[in-house]
Image (cartoon, rainbow, N blue to C red):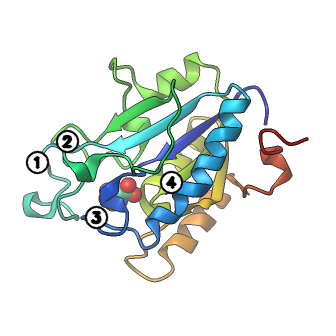
């Protein structure tokens, strides 16, 4: 990985995992792969961002207030916590999004750091030129992240073994991947040469 690479983990929260309020089928399967990516980015000294949906109890994002979705990732609830097995390292930068009652905020590019700085500004300040993206869900927030990153002029790699989709309509995730590729995103898996060796191995 190049020195301007960074990892973006999108919304790996309890509510998007099996048993959660808006579960992605096999959503929890992304966790071991993401932990492996975290280890590699950490070993390489590269920035790691983790976004979280962080909705107020009343938001136009929820069905009962005109939106599409059942309540999920409500601020301060267990459902909004990161999956307990996700090993976020010290120094991870949490990107909060959807915390305004009028925002869907599928994309972390609409999010902010704990000290209130906009994610696109932080990316620019850190000199990130290549974003590796995994998490939940392929056909919503991962898709939005990848497309916004491309619009921001970044090189983007979708981590295929670290993303899962909702598939409200069958095929949504595959169509989202095709859309990301058409927008210039690359695809990789843990064993891809582009990802580099696992830490501790040659
Ligand atoms: C998401 C649906 C609604 C996601 C968020 O994280 O992909 N999907 N809100």
The residue to which callout 3 is attached is 20
Q: Which residue is mark 2?
A: 75
- Percent x, y of residue 159: 64, 55
CA distance separating discs 4 and 3: 15 Å
Residue in view at x 39 percent, y 49 percent: 84
Q: Nearer the viewer, residue 86 or 185?
A: 86
Q: Which residue is mark 1?
A: 57
**Between residues 184 and 61, which one lies in front from this camera angle?**
61
C-alpha distance separating marks 2 and 3? 14 Å
- Hey, which residue is sitting farthest right in the picture? 202
Q: Residue at x 77, y 39 (%)?
A: 199
Q: Find numbered disc 1 in the image and state the secondary structure of the residue it sits on.
A: loop
Which numbered disc flags the more N-terminal residue, 4 or 3? 3
Residue position for label 4: 135
Q: At numbered mark 3, what does the secondary structure look like: helix, strand or loop?
A: loop
Tag 1–tag 3 contact (CB < 8 Å): no
């Amino acid at each position: 990985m190049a020195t301007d690479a960074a990892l973006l983990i999108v919304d790996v929260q309890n509510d998007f995992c099996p048993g959660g309020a808006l579960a992605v089928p096999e959503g929890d399967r992304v966790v071991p792969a993401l932990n492996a990516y975290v280890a590699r980015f950490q070993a390489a000294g590269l920035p790691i961002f983790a976004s979280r949906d962080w909705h107020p109890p009343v938001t136009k994002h929820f069905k009962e207030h005109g939106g599409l979705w059942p309540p999920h990732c409500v601020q301060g609830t267990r459902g909004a916590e990161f999956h307990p097995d996700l090993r976020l390292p010290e120094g991870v930068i949490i990107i909060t999004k959807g915390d305004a009652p009028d925002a869907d905020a599928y994309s972390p590019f609409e999010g902010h750091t704990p000290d209130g700085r906009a994610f696109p500004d932080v990316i620019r300040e850190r000199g990130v030129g290549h974003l590796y993206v995994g998490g939940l869900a392929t056909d919503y927030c991962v898709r939005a992240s990848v497309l916004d990153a491309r619009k921001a002029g970044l090189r983007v790699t979708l981590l295929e073994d670290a993303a899962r989709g909702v598939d409200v309509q069958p095929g949504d995730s595959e169509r989202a991947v095709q859309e990301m590729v058409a927008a210039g995103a690359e695809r990789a898996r843990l064993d891809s040469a582009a990802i580099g060796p696992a830490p501790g191995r040659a």
